[in-house]
Image: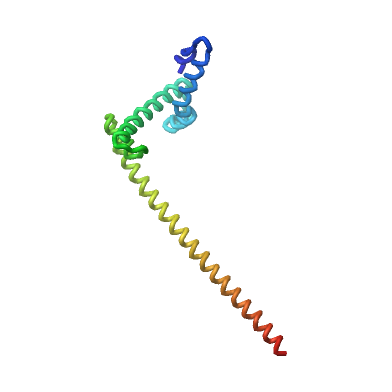
Amino acid sequence: MDNLIGAGSSNNGSDGVDKLLDQDQRLLPIANVGRIMKQILPPNAKISKEAKETMQECVSEFVSFVTGEASDKCRRERRKTVNGDDVCWALAALGFDDYAGPLKRYLHRYRELEVDRSSSIINNNQENNNNSNLMVMRLNDENLRAFEDHGRRNDDDACQ
């Protein structure tokens, strides 16, 4: 990132700012990169700002590279949405087979869990609906009995 400071200087001075803004928008958040790096290190290890910035550049470039390949595939297939399968394909196509296989397995498991979660939510909603319907029916029965009781009392009062 240091090589960009002052790199875009021109007469009006705004080009350098624009390039830095473009650079910041292109990069993954450094706090997230640092958090991921810290997970693999021993608890007492420190990470320099330079190391975080270097890794930020690398992972951002890697994500852009793989996503670009996946996007090209989608464009050729006249699709607008890049999905997980496209990313797995791009990894393999770019020679990252060691990552494509585990990512495919992860994606498969993720989808299974999503189906389980969705069916669980549907079942819970159906149970809630059934319970709500049962409550409404009970309330209706209670209201009907109360109405009938009220009607009987009025009839009894009228007969006396």
Near-viewer residue (152 or 80): 80
Q: Residue at x 34, y 42 (%)?
A: 107
Q: How many marks?
A: 0
**In the picture, which quadrant includes the C terminus?**
bottom right
**131 w.r.t. 24: above or below:** below
- Please state the horizontal and vertical placement of residue 46, each as a whole percent of the image: 48, 25
Q: Residue at x 35, y 39 (%)?
A: 84
Q: How is the image coloured?
A: rainbow
**Left of 12 or right of it: where is 89?**
left
**130 w.r.t. 56: above or below:** below
**63 w.r.t. 160: above or below:** above
**Left of 27 or right of it: where is 152?**
right
Near-viewer residue (143 or 40): 143
- Please state the horizontal and vertical placement of residue 38, each as a whole percent of the image: 45, 30
Q: Residue at x 45, y 29 (%)?
A: 28
Q: Residue furthest top?
A: 11
- Please state the horizontal and vertical placement of residue 125, each as a whole percent of the image: 47, 58
Q: Residue furthest bottom?
A: 160
**In the picture, which quadrant includes the N terminus?**
top left
Q: Residue furthest right?
A: 160
